[in-house]
Amino acid sequence: MSAKAGGPDRHWMAEAVRLGGSVRGRTAPNPNVGCVIVSGGRIVGQGATAPGGRPHAEAVALEAAGEAARGATLYATLEPCAHPSDRGPTCAELIPEAGVTRVVIGLRDPDPRTAGEGIAMLRDAGIAIDVLDEPAARASMSGYLMRLTDGRPRITLKLALSIDGKIALPSGESRWITGEDARAHVHLERAHSDMILVGRGTYLADSPKLDVRLPGLEDWSPRRALLTRGEAVEGWEKLSSPQDVYRLHDVNDLLVEGGSATATAFLAADLVDRILIYRAPILVGEGRNSIGYIGLDLIADAHGRWRASDAAHLGIDRLEVYERVRSESGDEA
Amino acid sequence: MSAKAGGPDRHWMAEAVRLGGSVRGRTAPNPNVGCVIVSGGRIVGQGATAPGGRPHAEAVALEAAGEAARGATLYATLEPCAHPSDRGPTCAELIPEAGVTRVVIGLRDPDPRTAGEGIAMLRDAGIAIDVLDEPAARASMSGYLMRLTDGRPRITLKLALSIDGKIALPSGESRWITGEDARAHVHLERAHSDMILVGRGTYLADSPKLDVRLPGLEDWSPRRALLTRGEAVEGWEKLSSPQDVYRLHDVNDLLVEGGSATATAFLAADLVDRILIYRAPILVGEGRNSIGYIGLDLIADAHGRWRASDAAHLGIDRLEVYERVRSESGDEA
């Protein structure tokens, strides 16, 4: 089992990562895995975890490949499962049965029911195995991985801001800070989230539908949650505090959409892993702040917590992505 | 006289633009012109307007070229001057005398003492002329051009902001929002400004030196100005209001460094042409806003005024450049 692999392996793994990423937000509590089966230098079968988590990506890809899987190499972003389920056979059994002779794995599965067991079963069946420990595979399943390692979803905070960091005029008027391209991107982020959360103020002011309004993705609309100490609302799950995210055992990716009090509560609790800033090229001046007091008493203490990881143009607006910097142990940096 | 020119002309003009841009902030009230003289496919002389505005770029380049200017092509970012001065001969006379046979001009000079007269004098002397109307040449002298067309300097507002648009904690503590690379870039912007302005609050709180602390550029420190209705301060020029910029007849480029009240006053008066945002990857939360009320009553009215024109990484920080969008007539868009 080598930790390194050549160019072709990286190439096919990237394809598998792309497939797995495409179903993010649809598979919880299962991981969003991608799989391609390659024979003679071309893909003979591919798949991703189906909505709801079953069938698994490997089963979908093997079904598509049929007899072509004999002697082929299977690329899976995550270690194939070793735990039997009422909803299907284990992938670690299916793969040798289909005649696959080599398996390249993006990442070991931290799920204690599989962790290393899938690899052991495959090896016992005479299959050659490579584990790439691929950062792109890790990133594509970061919600699932965080749930398993930290016991809560990966939490993304979305803010639509002016250059000067405002979310609205003093009156609350905020239509529209950002343009259509940015708003379409928000809908894509929603589609890749298992749950979206807003605060009670935003719920009452905007009664947002929080659905996905993208052609072909309408039925990808995630579960909706309200952060409130008050009454629950029909059709909405209720979180009494940000810490309630530790009760969400079936959510890999949570998108926090605001408003300011909700953003502040999650940031103050250090329960934000990623920030999406949709930045419009406008100045608001006097207006509503995006966040309030988050426990900061010195500017120096604000540094080292966030890393600008990505940026993109969205029409005249700009997307800035920041990721929380944490040490390997999971503590803050 | 053609409005189009081939690849080599663009290439040499780009060199001239680079030279002219390098002395921006040192030549006011004269334009910061760049000039290269090309013969046999190589540069035989080059120059930029000297500090204080004389000698002109063409004179410097001709002096460097000497006899090599005979039969050569001269590239100047601006139409050579046609008005005699106590401080030197006109460039439109010098150029034919040196034996130059062709002149490529980046931009016509709107100065009424030259406007077209320089071109006419050169043509009368038998010189072939091309005017490129080159956007890069226009951009490199935008301060000079704005002073001639609008009667005031080009005004740049600098703000060092957190992700959420704050300039300091509620206490006023702001050391440091941005890092060393960003602060070095501010010093470069200072070096390319004829004058720097701060408000009285910033003067009293920080007593900033506003000098240029870059190796080799220490003596490029620009004139300092204070926006105040109160007493003038020794060593500082005084502006009673943003509208006083129309009295600055010898300033091409003005850099407004803050604080918040000063930024707000210039923005409310629509007297900012360019904004430099030095954005640190930090969240401040409760803190001091960068700007206050600028006359905005609807978010829709905030749109169409600013265009994101450039962006760059400066260490872990990011520079965002925004330019005011104005119609051709000079009115607001």
Image (tube, coloured by chain):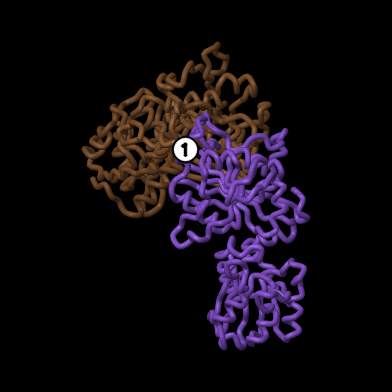
Chain colours: A purple, B brown
Residue found 63% across the figure and 56% down from its top: A253
Left or right of A5? Residue B126 is left
Residue B105 in the image: state x and y as whole percent.
Answer: 32, 42
Q: Is residue B136 above or below residue A51?
A: above
Query: Visible in this render: residue B282?
Result: no
Q: Is residue B89 above or below residue A177?
A: above
Please state which amino acid type lies under the numbered disc 1.
Ile
Q: Does the rendering let one see residue B38?
A: yes
- Residue B292, given in percent of the width and then of the height, sits at 53, 27
Foreground residue, A98 or B105? A98
- Secondary structure at badge 1 equals loop
- Residue at x 53%, y 50% (from the top left corner): A210
Instruction: Give me the residue at 45% from left, 32% from top.
Output: B50
Between residues A140 and B281, which one lies in front from this camera angle? A140
Quadrant in which the N terminus of chain A appears = bottom right
**Relative side of A22 to A129, left or right:** left
Q: Is residue A56 above or below residue A204?
A: below
Q: Residues within 10 Å of mark 1 (few under 14, many from 20)?
A: many
Q: Chain of mark 1?
A: A
Residue at label 1?
A: A282
